[in-house]
Amino acid sequence: MAQPPRRTHKRRESVLRRRIWGAAFILAVCAGVTPVTAAHAAPARPGPLPLERLFDNRAVSDDTRPGEADFDGAGSSLSAQDLTAAGWTPGRTMELDRARLTWPRAAGSGPDNVRANGQSVRVNGRGDALAFLVAGTGGDATGSGTVRYADGSRSTYRLTAPDWRSGPLATKAVALPHRNTPYAQVPEKTRLYAVTVPVRKGHRISSVDLPRAPKAGGGALHVFDLSVRAATSGWTGSWSASPAGYTAVGPWADRTIRLVVHTSTGGPKVRIRLENTFAATPVRIGSASVAVQGAGATALGKPVPLTFRGSSGTQLPAGGQAFSDPVDFDVPESANLLVSFHLPDPVTAAPVHSQAIQRSYVSTTGDHAAEADGSSYSSTISYWPLLTGVDVGGGPGSVVLLGDSITDGVKSTLDANHRWPNVLATRLLAQSKVPHYGVLNEGISANRVVADRYPGDGLSTDTGGVSALHRLDRDVFAQTSARTVVVFQGVNDVRWGASAEQVEAGLREIVERAHARGLKVIGATITPCEGEALCTPAADEQREAINSFVRSAGSGFDGFLDFDAVVRDPAHPARMLPAYDSGDHLHPGDPGLKALADSIDLNVLRP
């Protein structure tokens, strides 16, 4: 008998509630506000903020006050003095792998990084990648985040920040000699990393959600800066060389270096790229110029001066790079250029590409970059220090050739530009069915797919470079307008005991990472080398297994070049044809290198 009154009470309560909400709605509309009912309310998500507004950790301490920072939760920190000595000063914007990243203004005086945990960061721009300046503490730190675009779409990314004390030196942006603790400064390497992740090209980014911290275990992921890496529209890479090691040079003080480089494609504008890869200290460039080579160190006409952000010179921080400003200059195709730069301060070590197969020049004392006459250049060198790229205006983009000594041109004729990449560039220029792509030679003598020859840090006589896996971001993904990559490596791995399975896993990783960047990837089979000391029957067995993998559909490659079939002796397939052998049974000579380039169907290079 009590139930009907309760239903009547509930109906009256419901009517009253609707009337109250209706009155509130009318008042809100009159006030220009749209109310949200409790049934539709959601927890407020903080809007995206500039990264520095999110800083919650201090990584950098002054050596005299090390207790003011606690980067890793155990009282350790980076040395402000070490960073200054490396050229990483507070507020400085640096170019790292073609990305512009800024070292925090507060470094050494307050919070300078954020521990990633899903924070929303205000970011704006279009490009081909997001660039992060990061480090992990407590181990390598990995997590997934979200990129939000202005059109309302989103994509996810996965970011790994190697540990600041134990991460690979081969991929670091900079390594510092000390770790500060509250009690003493420890002589132990610390590291910072520049890491890029692909984004949707052409879509404007509005914000980025950082990865969330792991619920249990795993390292903390610290972010110092974040930016959108702009795509290199309007430029084509015409020449390049990979940093292969960090060696003693000179010493040079108040000297001008005049390097001879050979273009692939030409264009109406030019810029150069200088890199201080692997270094611990900055290098100052006083002035720079470019000219067409006449004879030796003499230019064909007055050299054109180059500037850097409007200045005649620049300073390259440890691990950093610098592009010169665009300048009008008719770069001829398939021609030798003279790229000159003055080093006003003492330089005793530098990143080098050791196997230039080309003579370049060093001047007597003074700045001689603007001189056409070569008489001031009194000595020669056979390597390329600091210079890693020459770009030309316009063009269809570039093909990147990732390789070892055969791609590098070892055993080809000195000063003749008979490397197989040069022959390929000449073929491209001589036809009209395929665009005249720039050809970028990223070969390093003695280089391997899965193991570092040079550890990636410190002075060394070994110029075999870091592994293809460790240099992939810098030597392929960061190259100017890269469209297609050809991977021709593996012989040094098997010569030094690597298994086919290890090399195949490395090649698969290269393919996967390149595809994620939108690049076409072509594999090349490994050429035979029986007769060379390390090319044992066991090594040849592994070589053959890798070649079967490269030829198979399961490799993931978008196509393959059968270089093995081109140069092998049909009567003895483990050996190179004598007509192609340079004499050491490992490297083809000029005829063999030409045969490799001539065998390529140019259509395979199309993206």
Image: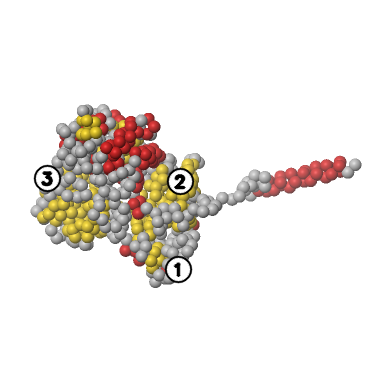
Check residue 581 in the rendering and tell me which mark sits there, or answer none. none
Instruction: Measure the C-alpha gap from mark 1 to mark 3.
Output: 59 Å
Residue 96 shown left or right of residue 426 in the figure? right
Q: Which quadrant of the rendered structure holds the C terminus?
A: top left
Mark before the other along the chain sequence, 1 or 3:
1
Instruction: Measure the C-alpha gap from mark 2 to mark 1.
Output: 32 Å
Q: Which quadrant of the rendered structure holds the N terminus?
A: top right
Helix, strand or loop for disc 3: strand
Q: Amino acid at mark 2?
A: Arg
**Label 1 Cα crowd, 10 Å radius (few <14 / some 14-19 / many 20+):** many
Mark before the other along the chain sequence, 2 or 1:
1
Q: Quadrant of residue 545?
A: top left
Tag 1 residue: 68
Mark before the other along the chain sequence, 2 or 3:
2
Residue 492 shown left or right of residue 53 in the figure? left
Check residue 294 in the rendering and tell me which mark sits there, or answer none. 3
Instruction: Measure the C-alpha gap from mark 2 to mark 3.
Output: 50 Å
Q: Identify which residue is drawn at 17% across, 49% down.
A: 382
Most foreground residue, 576 or 18? 576
Q: Amino acid at mark 1?
A: Glu
Tag 2 residue: 158
Helix, strand or loop for disc 1: helix
Q: Identify which residue is drawn at 39% across, 54% down.
A: 167
